[in-house]
Amino acid sequence: MSIAYFDHAAATPVRPEVLEEMLPYFRERFGNPSAVYDLGSGIKEVLEEQRAKVARLLGARPQEIIFTSSGAEANNLAVKGAALAHLKKGRHVIVSGIEHHSVLNAARYLEKFHDFEATFLPVDRFGQVDPERLRQALTPATVLVSIQVASNEIGTIQNIPALAAVCREAGVLFHTDAVAAAGQIPLNVEELGVDLLTLSGPALGGPKGVGALYFRKRLRLVPQIHGGIQEDGRRGGTENVPGIVGLGKAAELAATELADKGPYLASLRDRLVEGVLKAVPEVIYTGHPKRRLPGHASFCFEGVEGEALVFLLSRQGVYANTGSACASKALKVSPVLCAIGLSPAVAQGSLVFTLERSNTAADLEAVFTHLPPAVARLRSFSPVWHKKMAAGGAGP
């Protein structure tokens, strides 16, 4: 059975070029970068080369890149590290209500253990934050705002330059989680106007277990992992050299391929959306219809449990997800879908497709073949669906 894989936001294969670049650092070039002899000092140079590659993807300076174990760790370092480093200014942070759990829970941690106040900004029906609403939420005690570049659940892209400008005018630090956006749309930290930005290796076709944080030069951070002097004392622990090499190569490839990749993914996505909306009745296309990631399509199918739909599709070789992979087993209604105004009953029927260059027109045909009967089967068992049909198919 052939496979049509549409869950690249959760996991994506390591690119062959990336794996090839990594392999020597597991055996032949195994030295510790902190060692003073040549086996170590040579590896230190390699790490700086990767730092430069990641920096080029973002229009940043190499010395403004910190390597971490994941995007989640980078988000924690950004939110908690920056907030705790600026306690003299105040104890107030602002995040949007649809952030990744690593940002939301970092803000809650500051509330619970460090006497911070956290404001969770609402979004509109497309998942966008209004810059004026952000301006009104700022207080003299606000030290940090964190709003993602784009949602990995509904695909909506935020107006980061406008949001960051509001913070810059008020002298407030601005962090953005760019994990879902990196490699799909151009990212330049100067054009975005951000102070901190998060990346993840797997999202770029690199290995799991590695991420990076951009931080504007001279910005103070309190380390969240205490140890040695690695990463200039900002993040303790022996560096994951193979992973960092993989991230550097993935970033290098992303920078060279971005101009062609975006249009290809957008074309494939638009065909997917058109086909799904045509083939299945009573479907809601979630997120912004135009201002969204090129490789992202998300839907809610009324009268359907998203997890059951994912299971049925997987048995036919079609792999998608119900939303964030970090929350897909929590058995709770998506807070992102509730934040954009969907009822819990409708939000339960979420299905998210995240595409990559490896996806083809044949993959779309697999969706069009297997999705309609899977939805019909689940609806045939659904009391909610039968009640809706008996009422004449009225909206939610």
Image (cartoon, rainbow, N blue to C red):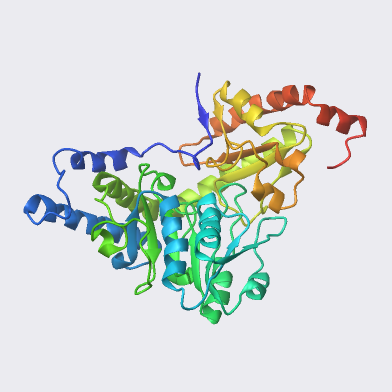
Q: Is residue 300 left or right of residue 232?
A: right
The residue located at (70%, 31%) in the rendering is 305
Q: Is residue 197 above or below residue 142?
A: above
Q: Is residue 174 visible?
A: yes
Q: Is residue 187 visible?
A: no
Quarter of the picture containing the C terminus is top right
Residue 99 location, quadrant: bottom right
Residue 320 point in image, percent of width and height: 57, 34
Q: Which of these two is toward me, 171 or 13?
A: 171
Q: Which of these two is toward me, 374 or 231?
A: 231
Q: Is residue 40 left or right of residue 277?
A: left
Q: Is residue 229 above or below residue 203?
A: below
Residue 318 location, quadrant: top right
Q: Is residue 91 above or below residue 316?
A: below
Residue 112 point in image, percent of width and height: 54, 59
The residue located at (29%, 39%) in the rendering is 19
Q: Is residue 319 left or right of residue 208?
A: right
The residue sitting at the right extreme is 391
Residue 208 point in image, percent of width and height: 37, 42
Q: Is residue 363 left or right of residue 67?
A: right
The residue located at (36%, 67%) in the rendering is 60
Residue 142 point in image, percent of width and height: 55, 74
Q: Is residue 310 above or below residue 97?
A: above
